Image (cartoon, grey):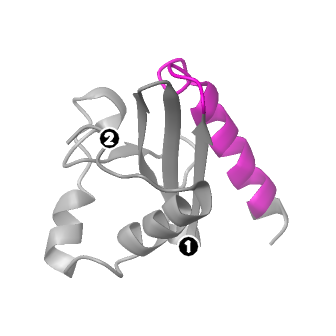
Amino acid sequence: GAAGIAADAPTLARWGYMLYGGRVLEPAVLATMMKPNWSSDFGYGFGSTFDNTSGTLVVGHGGDYMGYSSILLAWPPTHTAVAILVPRQGMTIDGTVLGWAFELYKALDAGS
């Protein structure tokens, strides 16, 4: 349900790494979860959003609730996940936190 997880950013990023990296769910369940519904906004389907505009699959989930914004993104092909939490609601909806997450990934990817 709404606000169904409470965690700090490192813990949330690790959860994304484990979840989308196939370390939590059975392969058949993960395969269902990893099927984008491109007819919806951001390919939303089975609890995850998807993007591949950069040529690499990105999967995750964002939210705004009770004065906070957050986003979890994972790049399964590169085994990378990032999470950003902000004490201000609406920043996921307006794309600010999403942009920060992509910039963080680029910085991490450049360092590898």
Residue bearing the label numbered 1: 79
> Foreground: 3 or 43?
3
Secondary structure under badge 1? loop
C-alpha gap between disc 1 and disc 2: 26 Å
Image location of residue 62, percent across then percent down: 43, 39
Residue 93's tag is: none
Q: Mark 2 and mark 1 in contact (Cβ < 8 Å)? A: no
Image location of residue 54, percent across then percent down: 59, 45
Characterize the local packing of mark 1: few (<14), some (14-19) or many (20 or more) Cα atoms within 10 angstroms. Answer: few
Residue drawn at x 80%, y 54% is: 107
Rendered position, 1 above or below 93: below
Q: Which residues are magenta?
A: 87-108
Image location of residue 39, percent across then percent down: 22, 30
Secondary structure under badge 2? loop
Q: Amino acid at mark 2?
A: Ala
> Foreground: 11 or 55?
11
Residue bearing the label numbered 2: 3
> Foreground: 89 or 25?
89
Q: Amino acid at mark 1?
A: His
